[in-house]
Image (spheres, rainbow, N blue to C red):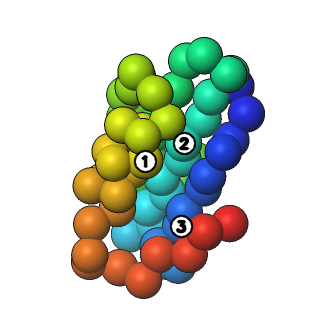
Amino acid sequence: MRVEHHWWNGDVRLARRDVFVRTDGSVWEVEAQMGGPEGKSKVQNCPGRASAMILADAWRGPRWQWREI
């Protein structure tokens, strides 16, 4: 799987949030991480790029200033 998009909320503490969109060319997945790499995460498979981007937008939400890495 390669990372197509990665967003970060800019926080380096426990409130850190990351959202990833990954694909291998046929399978798409979105991962939301809370608390950095050692924290909790949730992965959802999506049927295509459009649905993965919609889910990533929903999981980011308006609460933080998101930056794409």
Residue 11 to residue 6: above or below: below
Q: CA distance from mark 2 to mark 3?
A: 12 Å
Which quadrant of the figure contains the N terminus?
Answer: top right
Q: Earlier in the sequence, mark 2 or mark 1?
A: 2
Q: Earlier in the sequence, mark 2 or mark 3?
A: 3
Where is residue 9 drawn, in percent x and y? 47, 73
Q: Amino acid at mark 1?
A: Met
Viewer can see residue 15: yes
Where is residue 65 drawn, in percent x and y? 42, 83
Residue 33 to residue 68: above or below: above
Q: What crowding class fits label 1: few (fewer than 14 Cα within 10 Å), some (14-19), or many (20 or more)? A: some
Residue 30 to residue 13: above or below: above
Q: Residue at x 62, y 28 (%)?
A: 23
**Is 7 left, or right, of 25 in this rendering?**
left
Q: CA distance from mark 2 to mark 1?
A: 7 Å
Which residue lies under the disc numbered 1? 53
Which residue lies under the disc numbered 3? 8
Q: Residue at x 27, y 55 (%)?
A: 58
Secondary structure under the numbered disc 1 in the rendered image: helix
Which residue lies under the disc numbered 2? 21
Q: Amino acid at mark 2?
A: Val
Where is residue 31 drawn, in percent x and y? 46, 39
Q: Choose mark 1 or mark 3, whichever is in front.
A: 1
Asked which quadrant contains residue 21, the reply is: top right
